[in-house]
Image: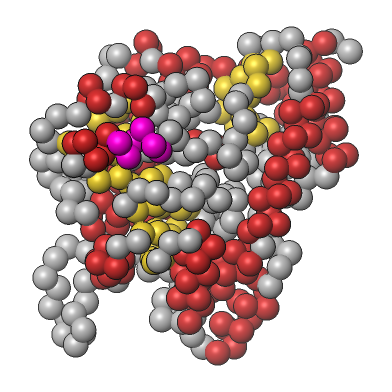
Amino acid sequence: MDFTHPVSRPSLDGRELEYVTDAVSSGWISSQGPYVQRFEEAFARWNGVAHGVACSSGTSALTLALRALGIGPGDEVIVPEFTMVASAWAVTYTGATPVFVDCGDDLNIDVTRIEEKITPRTRAIMPVHVYGRRCDMDAVMDLAHQYNLRVVEDSAEAHGVRPVGDIACFSLFANKIITAGEGGVCLTEDPRLAQQMAHLRAMAFTRDHSFLHKKLAYNFRMTAMQGAVALAQVERLDEILATRREIEARYDAGLKDLPGITLMPARDVLWMYDLRAERREELRAHLDARGVETRLFFKPMSRQPGYLDPVWPTLNAHRFSEDGLYLPTHTGLTAADQEYITGAVREFCTGS
């Protein structure tokens, strides 16, 4: 059905159309067009990081990061239980093995449980900034230093959380804080890692383009049209984040102290407004009937068919997945829209 209030809607109110039109008019629509490099430089500069490498998706960004770090068969990577499955898939794509760690009450990886999962085969930790909440990166970086591990931040939902790991990977899917429709980008301070990721995303062509490829690589390139949209989005990133902070504050006020509703900890940047509901499926049906779309929390990685582990029913990640959902969250929401949505939730919770 078509929802009056969808979960997400991209904000394309800047120079997106102007830049895409310019790219098409110039004929530079492939990955060689200048808008890709302009986006990479602008996003890296906004984050205070030296290098950006744009690619085709957030999943491909994670895969490029792991490959650039030399991770492959026989290696292990620490991954949260509570995340989107692409985090684990990226590890599997390299031939390495994801090793899962349960979440804490903020849905992020429980850093106190990471060390017990480290083995001689562990090569990296992949913290995920879930729904825009920054992981305890001080603890993650301390462990990485102690055990000589690399850190790949899955920042798909956290544009605005400044990177501190070896590589940070962002998604540019249409529902993300900034978007290119599809796409991703890796940020790093290390020029060699940046060069390797750029090499791997473009099929590992040699400089003379001789069609001899010395390693397995990918066609993970971003088009100039996507780069044009992404650049326009970066130009408005401060404005977008500020608007999302206002949306979070209005939801906090409108949903405070409702019976059967548990509000989640504050977010460093707002991707989606998440909460827990004792009668979740009934609440979702109630909101659905009023044109308000909702989405469920992630399911534990250990419940996924490809990683099935009988431990999954005991996990915090499972407990949260059973009653968690998120509400419409996008910069097009007005105060009136949010009053309607929170009013519908209050109506369900209080019966009035």
Q: Is residue 139 magenta?
A: yes
Q: Residue at x 56, y 73 (%)?
A: 228
With respect to residue 106, does 164 lie above or below?
Answer: below
Q: Does residue 15 appear left or right of residue 103 in this picture?
A: right
Residue at 76% x, 14% y: name it: 258
Residue 246 appears at what percent x and percent y? 75, 42
Please name the residue shown 28% across and 14% down the image: 310
Q: Kindly report the secondary structure that dominates the magenta region of the rendered protein.
A: helix
Location of residue 196 in the rendering, given as x and y in whole percent from the top left corner: 24, 66
Q: Is residue 201 visible from the viewing direction of this image?
A: no
Residue 232 visible at all: yes
Viewport quadrant of the C terminus: top right
Is 213 situated above or below 47? below
Marks counted in the figure total: 0
Q: Is residue 322 left or right of residue 258?
A: left
Residue 192, horizontal then vertical, whole percent: 24, 67
Q: Nearer the viewer, residue 222 or 117?
A: 117
Does the magenta portion include 184?
no
The x, y position of residue 226, in whole percent, is 52, 69
Q: In this view of the protein, which residue sits in the foreground, 152 or 285?
A: 152
The residue nearer to you, when weighing 46 against 21, is 46
The image quadrant of residue 263 is: top right
- In the image, residue 82 sits, relative to residue 313, either above or below, namely below
- The residue segment tinted magenta is 137-142
Residue under the image location 40 percent in, 38 percent down: 137
Please identify the quarter of the rendering in which residue 11 is found.
bottom right
Position of residue 287 in the picture relative to residue 20 (left or right): right
